[in-house]
Image: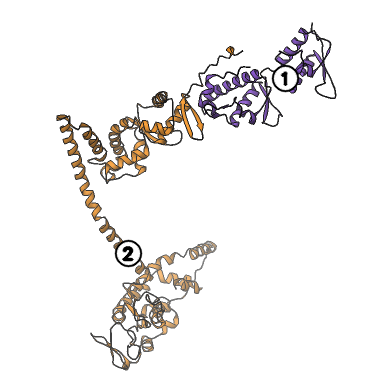
Chain colours: A orange, B purple
């Protein structure tokens, strides 16, 4: 409506200056609108009753939520159009409207005015006492007039004054500059900066008209309410988890105390030392008393994480022969942390800090792109030597067999085998059954052909 | 005739797989070349049809059930060609190749030696006599492939030591050797 108003009149420049510069024009409108609203909101319920199914709908819904029947036009048009006309478009015809005339036009004759009591509304025609939310009399179908808002009340003096004001301003350019002014004016017209100003103003009357539902603020309110509800649901859902988190540290403490006890016991008695050690390794893999979290350490989070990771891995790496795939590290580390899990990205960042922090391990990318964490003193030559040793012992091996011996993942082992092949220490035998690895006797093979000739 | 004696590497399964390691592969291919040359010399084979050869014991070790792949053999033959030890036949197809366990130049020398030893200088000898004749029995070029023989004779012709005499049949083609001495 606003844009229509601005577009329609060619004299828009004049009205624009008139509307904005004194800023008196709209200001009287607001108080009148607010004073008008209590009287109307008393009469007007926030719901409308569907005449088809009698479901009580919110005033903002254009259709019945239950049966989909359109909201009666009488309600919408009488309330919204009259409002908008009076408030926004100050056409000269409206300005001439007298408040009394408009009142008489909309409201029905005073003899048929419905009587509103605390019990309900008594029908002006058949005197049946209807429920206060009814729009039409339940008995005779007479319109109860509960929705009659005469927006004409809102037509205020301020608007009338505005129409009476000078409709145009003549600008004379004595020393030229008319062209540049014209350009500026045109750009201002296309930018329509004033729309941005008028928009919030246009919201206010609507909220006044219907303080709970309707308009943009109503939608926003709805969204906010939905979010509130969702948050509540989530909070309830995770309440138990919070409790678990709180208990987690206790659990870890318990695990450590058991570990301590076990250590003491095993030192005292040699009985079932094996069981104890396996149990204590489980606990080692499980327990981490105060995991580094983002909250605790802030900006040095990754450094701290790297340190803790190094501490955690030092024992594990040894067990895994100095090399672990990053995904395995991720699993074990998060299992040890229990509940304060870290993201793969954080782990990667922390691992890439090993070198800078001078920790005894490195993040290493293998030829295939597989990322591994390996002990700093652990390099390809050592691995190659070890792989070769295994192959020498067994004659030949597949990646799967070696993985079983090494207690490592097949991906890692095949990487190591490829590396050893590329070093020329072993050679491959490709068959339909798969690839077997042999010690490389080809490279140094000497065939004494002289014996043949 | 005793069987060809393969080297022990012939019983090493990875030997039949093209090795991914470049250095290993070079050694492996070189070993294969030696085996092919020795094998061909042993059985006087001058021409290998690759797909046929793959089914023979040369490239198929039944005892360990390993067989060389065609692509691998082709790569080996390519290396041989680079070293002048083989030649595709026909040249634009990679299905079969001459195996020069003696190069055409070496053949030329041994033929001319044989000619002078047998006092055949300045007389005309047919190709059949050289390849299958009684006189050539016991020489390396006995049962030589005709195409290889022609290549060898070409070398002699270019040197001016021989002259070929055309005939209706290739086997009846004659060669006149001019004694060097």
Q: Quadrant of residue A389?
A: top left
Q: Quadrant of the N terminus of chain A?
A: bottom left
Where residue A344 appears, x then y in whole percent? 36, 43
Q: Dot 2 falls on which chain?
A: A
Residue sitting at the far front? B1
Residue B129 location (% of width, % of height) = 79, 16
Q: Residues within 10 Å of mark 1 (few under 14, many from 20)?
A: many
* Element assignment for label 2: helix
Q: Which mark is residue B181?
A: none
Residue position marked by numbered label 2 in the rendering: A226
Q: Residue furthest left?
A: A268
Q: Nearer the viewer, mark 1 or mark 2?
A: 1
**Residue receiving disc 1:** B144
Report whether A215 appears left or right of A9: left
Depth check, front residue: B13 or B163 = B13
A14 on left or right of A338:
right
- Observer-nearest residue: A424 or A352? A424
Give the answer, above or below, for where A293 lies relative to A207: above
Where does the C terminus of chain A fall, quadrant-wise? top right
Q: Residues within 10 Å of mark 2 (few under 14, many from 20)?
A: few
Residue at 71% across / 13% down in the picture?
A: B139
Q: Secondary structure at mark 1?
A: loop
Nearer to me, A187 or A85: A85
């Amino acid at each position: 409506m606003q844009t229509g108003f601005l577009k329609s009149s060619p004299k828009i420049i004049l009205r624009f200056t008139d509307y904005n510069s004194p800023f008196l024009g709209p200001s009287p409108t607001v108080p009148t609108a607010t004073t008008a609203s209590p009287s109307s909101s008393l009469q007007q319920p926030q719901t409308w009753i569907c005449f088809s199914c009698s479901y009580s709908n919110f005033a903002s819904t254009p259709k019945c939520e239950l049966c989909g029947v359109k909201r009666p036009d009488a309600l919408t048009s009488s309330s919204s159009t009259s409002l908008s006309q009076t408030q926004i478009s100050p056409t000269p015809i409206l300005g001439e409207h007298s408040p009394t005339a408009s009142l008489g036009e909309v409201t029905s004759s005073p003899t048929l005015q419905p009587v509103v009591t605390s019990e309900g509304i008594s029908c002006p025609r058949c005197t049946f006492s209807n429920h206060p939310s009814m729009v039409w009399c339940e008995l005779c179908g007479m319109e109860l007039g509960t929705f009659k808002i005469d927006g004409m009340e809102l037509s205020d003096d301020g608007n009338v004054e505005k129409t009476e004001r000078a409709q145009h301003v003549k600008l004379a350019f004595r020393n030229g500059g008319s062209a540049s002014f014209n350009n500026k004016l045109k750009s201002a017209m296309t930018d329509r900066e004033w729309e941005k100003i008028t928009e919030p103003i246009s919201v206010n009357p609507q909220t006044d008209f219907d303080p709970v539902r309707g308009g943009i603020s109503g939608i926003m309110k709805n969204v906010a309410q939905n979010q509130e509800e969702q948050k509540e649901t989530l909070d309830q859902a995770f309440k138990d988890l919070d409790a678990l988190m709180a208990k987690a540290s206790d659990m870890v403490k318990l695990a450590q105390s058991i570990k301590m006890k076990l250590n003491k016991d095993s030192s005292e008695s040699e009985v079932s030392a094996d069981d104890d050690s396996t149990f204590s390794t489980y606990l080692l893999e499980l327990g981490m008393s105060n995991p580094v979290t983002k909250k605790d350490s802030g900006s040095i989070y990754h450094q701290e994480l790297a340190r803790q990771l190094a501490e955690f891995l030092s024992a594990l790496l040894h067990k895994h022969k100095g090399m672990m795939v990053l995904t395995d590290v991720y699993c074990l580390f998060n299992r040890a942390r229990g509940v304060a899990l870290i993201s793969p990205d954080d782990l990667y960042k922390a691992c890439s800090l090993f070198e800078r922090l001078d920790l005894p391990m490195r993040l290493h990318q293998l030829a295939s792109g597989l990322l591994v964490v390996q002990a700093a003193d652990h390099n390809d030559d050592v691995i190659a030597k070890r792989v070769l040793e295994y192959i020498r012992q067994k004659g030949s091996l597949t990646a799967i067999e070696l993985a079983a011996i090494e207690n490592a993942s097949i991906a890692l082992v095949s990487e190591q085998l490829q590396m050893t092949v590329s070093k020329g220490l072993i050679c491959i035998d490709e068959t339909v059954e798969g690839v077997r690895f042999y010690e490389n006797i080809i490279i140094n093979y000497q065939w004494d052909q002289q014996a043949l000739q | 005739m005793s069987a060809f004696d393969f080297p022990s590497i012939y019983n090493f399964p990875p030997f039949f797989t093209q090795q991914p390691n470049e250095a290993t592969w070079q050694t492996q291919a070189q070993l294969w070349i030696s085996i092919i040359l020795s094998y061909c010399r042993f059985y006087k084979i001058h021409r290998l049809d690759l797909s046929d050869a793959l089914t023979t014991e040369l490239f198929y070790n039944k005892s360990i059930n390993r067989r060389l792949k065609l692509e691998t053999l082709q790569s080996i033959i390519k290396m041989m060609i680079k070293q002048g030890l083989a030649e595709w036949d026909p040249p634009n197809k990679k299905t079969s190749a001459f195996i020069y366990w003696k190069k055409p130049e070496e053949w030329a020398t041994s033929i001319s030696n044989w000619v002078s030893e047998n006092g055949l200088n300045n007389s005309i000898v047919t190709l059949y006599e050289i390849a299958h004749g009684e006189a050539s029995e016991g020489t390396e070029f006995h049962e030589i492939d005709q195409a290889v023989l022609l290549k060898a004779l070409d070398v002699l012709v270019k040197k001016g030591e021989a002259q070929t005499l055309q005939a209706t049949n290739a086997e009846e083609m004659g060669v006149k050797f001019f004694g060097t001495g």
